[in-house]
Amino acid sequence: MAVRDLLPVWVLEDMRTMEVFHWEDDGQACAYSPSEAFLYALVHDHQQYARYLLNRFSTRALEMPSRSFCCCQASTTPHLAIAVRYNRINILKMIMTTIKDFTDCERRSYLNRHGCVHTDGSKTALHLACDLVRPECLILLLGHGACPYATDLTGNTPLDCLLSQICQSDFDMRTKRICLGYLILFMPTFRFQMKRQLQDNADVWKALIGEQAFQWLSGSSPPSLFVQAMQKLSQSIPTDKLDSLPDFLKPLDFRLDQA
């Protein structure tokens, strides 16, 4: 309740370290760890507290919380999943800044780790961003190294998840197409389960995603030279240099022509 009410950071830290405890499954009373406090900051969008925890504790704030907070201890990315689920874009940016301290291998492992099998279906944060159609979360994850070819328990890639959303409903199709454009930018080759479905139902999918995107995804023709150049750019430029690019060269400004 204290985090929900957006109390000052110093009050919350005093409470966390001296006053407030939670019960573990074994009946032991424990103080909230920085990681557990960060979960509350995410859920209630307390950005000042989230910034404090990441600045003060760095990657400790991203460690796996206790079993009373997450039953799947094999998943080490509940914070990423919650950031995407609740669309906490500003706090997700803070997380991306913090994991710059990771090695390249550690960062890729963190971004591509599968989530809780019970709440997230063992999907990665990128899968969730596509399921929930979160374009800002999607481009942040892709731009910092999340793999668009990761598969969930059923073999679906994030692109499969997004295409499923597109064919299920025409609600907010513009945002879905923006997400599709972002994925195309970070996928030099289009490997996904639903490719055969696109090929077998060409007219339906042309109407849904447009002729141009259909040609690319179905393998009928390669992406345009501009898109291929943007794919190379998105793979080669450091993420902290994207803001220095001219607007017309930024992946964030890329749209399919149907958007």
Image: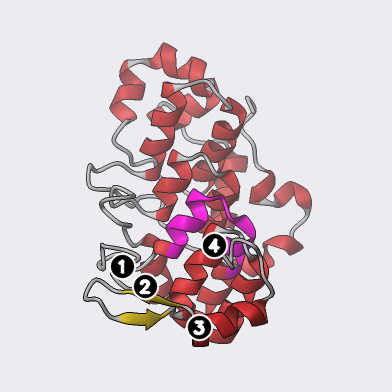
Name the mark nearer the viewer: 2 or 1: 1
Name the mark nearer the viewer: 2 or 3: 3
Residue 189: x %, y % from top left: 40, 44
Q: Is residue 206 magenta?
A: no
The amino acid type of the residue labelled 3 equals: Glu
Q: Residues within 10 Å of mark 2 (few under 14, many from 20)?
A: many
Residue 243: x %, y % from top left: 73, 61
Determine whether the residue tagged by mark 3 lies in a helix, strand or loop: helix
Tell me the number on the disc at residue 65.
2
- In this image, 181 relative to 110: left or right? right
Residue 229: x %, y % from top left: 59, 48
Q: Which residue is mark 3?
A: 19
The amino acid type of the residue labelled 1 equals: Ser
Earlier along the polypeptide chain: callout 2 or callout 3? 3
Q: Residues within 10 Å of mark 1 (few under 14, many from 20)?
A: few
Earlier along the polypeptide chain: callout 2 or callout 4? 4
Are discs 3 and 1 less than 8 Å apart at CB?
no
Q: How far apart, in angstroms, are the residues tagged by discs 2 and 3?
A: 19 Å
Q: How far apart, in angstroms, are the residues tagged by discs 3 and 1?
A: 19 Å
- Using the rendered view, name the quadrant where residue 50 is placed: bottom right
Q: How far apart, in angstroms, are the residues tagged by discs 3 and 4?
A: 21 Å
Q: How far apart, in angstroms, are the residues tagged by discs 1 and 4?
A: 17 Å
Q: Which residue is mark 4?
A: 42
Q: Is residue 155 above or below residue 125?
A: above
Determine whether the residue tagged by mark 4 lies in a helix, strand or loop: helix
Earlier along the polypeptide chain: callout 3 or callout 4? 3
